[in-house]
Image (cartoon, rainbow, N blue to C red):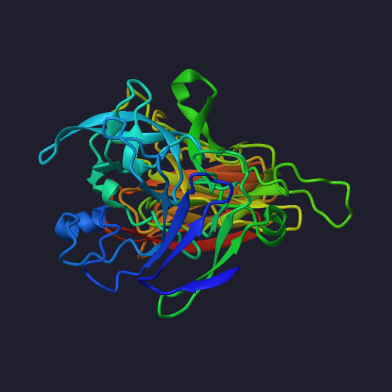
């Protein structure tokens, strides 16, 4: 069944095989009015009006799905009293626990919660989180600043009012099925009920076209896998303990669609389903980077260790200040089924570390970056502009004598960073401008017959 829902309209859908009957109420909220307060949380809404309906906060548009049942098993808060209506959060259901406690001048001492594991059926959304031990409910008033490792960095959000990502939207989360997180399964019966709701398009007036399936095989054949959820990035340490050196470790919850996770491989018309893993690096964590596909892994795995990236924590016996720049590596994944249909990319997971070891005494450090040999000579630096340290990265496709020098804008040589024979590989050398004035500088490389000069800017 295909249907278009204009903004302000609702559609009532009976959940199959439920007695007493359960329903999904599907409503389109495009916030054409300042009184449309279905989603009033998020840091943006707090900054505008402390998440009140009036004046208007634009964030939080989308297709919102509510679950109606006589005894709603997914929303028994407030002393165990069930509510007949529960908002289905497109971000998913999880097991939660306390990340830490912070002290805010406005809110006092308050817990900051975090997702532990994804749980399609028995988990709860951010509206009614339960700490694992003890089992106590907590409203989401603050959100961790994921770009900072400092314990006092967080945002006031009031996300229990809706954080702007609770609705389903084209390009964000489009499939609500027995396999997705959240799931269309009923409270009474967690078996597959065959009900799938998919967003197909949205017009310039905000009307959203849906297709509703009651046949599970048809839905699986027509649609890609659901969006992967609960992507996290941790650290796998290696080497000497004092080095604080690690590889990023990416984990996520498995997709369970039959044409993805348990796909047959006997037919020549089918392909092997995989997860595609995308990566990006940036020195500005708060800006969403541009991702590139780096590899694929089996549809039955839920972990990837990125051995091509090495990062460092700051050493405990080194002052908090580290002159080397912090790098943030971000990851996303998507699921590709046995017919090549691709899901939407997951949410961003990230890890931050130093590109060079802060515990090294020398300012001029050369390290191999990967074990992959480059196919051509190149040189670049980041960040640029920089203050006070930048990393000059250079690629050598063969063994060669290398010279890298720094010049001021008048062409006067200031420093030699490298002057030695190097084997083929990828390298990085740190240059500190702490002893120099702000301005334009140049760095040059001579490697065999290859020569190049590039510009960099020191801003203090």
Where residue 234 appears, as percent x and y from the top left, is 48, 33
Report if residue 399 is visible in the image: no
Where residue 328 appears, as percent x and y from the top left, is 43, 46
Residue at the image point whose x is 43% and y is 80% from the top: 204
Residue 167 in which image quadrant: bottom left
Residue situated in front as seen by the camera: 76 or 367 = 76
Q: Compared to 227, does 54 lie above or below? A: below
Where residue 54 appears, as percent x and y from the top left, is 15, 65
Q: Is residue 24 left or right of residue 295?
A: left
Report if residue 301 is visible in the image: yes
Q: Is residue 161 left or right of residue 76?
A: left
- Quarter in which the N terminus is drawn: bottom right
Q: How many marks?
A: 0
Residue at the image point whose x is 28% and y is 41% from the top: 140
Which residue ends up furthest to the bottom in the rendered image? 204
Residue situated in front as seen by the camera: 447 or 204 = 204
Residue 150 in which image quadrant: top left
Residue situated in front as seen by the camera: 244 or 348 = 348
Residue situated in front as seen by the camera: 401 or 281 = 281
Q: Compared to 457, does 323 lie above or below? A: above
Q: Is residue 233 left or right of residue 264?
A: left
- Quarter in which the C terminus is drawn: bottom left
Which residue ends up furthest to the front in the rendered image? 20
Which residue ends up furthest to the left in the rendered image? 105
Where residue 290 appears, as percent x and y from the top left, is 50, 59
């Amino acid at each position: 069944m295909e249907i278009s829902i204009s903004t302000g309209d609702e559609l009532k859908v009976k959940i199959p095989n439920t007695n007493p009957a359960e329903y999904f109420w599907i409503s389109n909220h495009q916030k054409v009015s300042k009184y449309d307060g279905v989603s009033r949380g998020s840091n943006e809404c707090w900054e505008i009006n402390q998440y009140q309906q009036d004046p208007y906060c634009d964030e939080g548009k989308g297709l919102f799905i509510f679950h109606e049942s006589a005894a709603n098993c997914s929303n028994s808060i407030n002393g165990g009293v069930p509510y007949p209506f529960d908002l289905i959060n497109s971000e998913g259901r999880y097991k939660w626990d306390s990340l830490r406690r912070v002290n805010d001048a406005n809110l006092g001492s308050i817990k900051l919660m975090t997702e532990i594991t994804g749980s399609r059926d028995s988990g709860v959304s951010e509206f009614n989180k339960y700490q694992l031990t003890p089992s106590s409910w907590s409203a989401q008033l603050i959100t961790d600043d994921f770009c900072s490792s400092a314990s006092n960095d967080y945002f006031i959000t009031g996300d229990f009012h809706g954080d702007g990502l609770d609705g389903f939207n084209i390009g964000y989360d489009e499939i609500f099925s027995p396999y997705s997180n959240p799931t269309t399964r009923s409270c009474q019966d967690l078996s597959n009920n065959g009900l799938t709701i998919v967003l197909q398009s949205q017009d310039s007036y905000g009307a959203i076209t849906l297709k509703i399936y009651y046949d599970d095989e048809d839905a699986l054949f027509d649609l890609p896998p659901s969006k992967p959820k609960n992507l996290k990035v941790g650290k796998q340490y290696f080497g000497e303990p004092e080095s604080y050196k690690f590889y990023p470790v990416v984990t996520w919850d498995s997709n369970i669609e039959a044409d993805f996770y348990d796909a047959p491989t006997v037919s020549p018309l089918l392909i092997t389903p995989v997860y595609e893993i995308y990566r990006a690096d940036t020195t500005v964590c708060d800006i969403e980077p541009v991702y590139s596909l780096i590899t694929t892994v089996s549809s039955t795995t839920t972990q990837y260790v990125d051995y091509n990236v090495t990062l460092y924590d700051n050493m405990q016996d080194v002052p908090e200040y580290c002159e080397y720049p912090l790098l943030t590596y971000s990851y996303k994944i998507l699921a590709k089924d046995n017919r090549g249909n691709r899901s939407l990319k997951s949410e961003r997971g990230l890890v931050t570390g130093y590109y060079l070891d802060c515990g090294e005494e020398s300012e001029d450090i050369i390290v191999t970056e990967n074990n992959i040999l480059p196919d051509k000579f190149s040189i670049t630096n980041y960040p640029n502009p920089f203050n006070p340290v930048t990393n000059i990265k250079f690629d050598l496709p063969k063994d060669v004598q290398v010279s890298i020098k720094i010049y001021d804008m008048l062409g006067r040589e200031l420093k030699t960073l490298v002057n030695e024979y190097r084997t083929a590989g990828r390298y990085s050398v740190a240059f500190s401008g702490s002893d120099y004035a702000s301005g334009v500088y140049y760095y040059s490389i001579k490697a065999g017959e290859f020569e190049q000069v590039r510009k960099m800017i020191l801003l203090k």
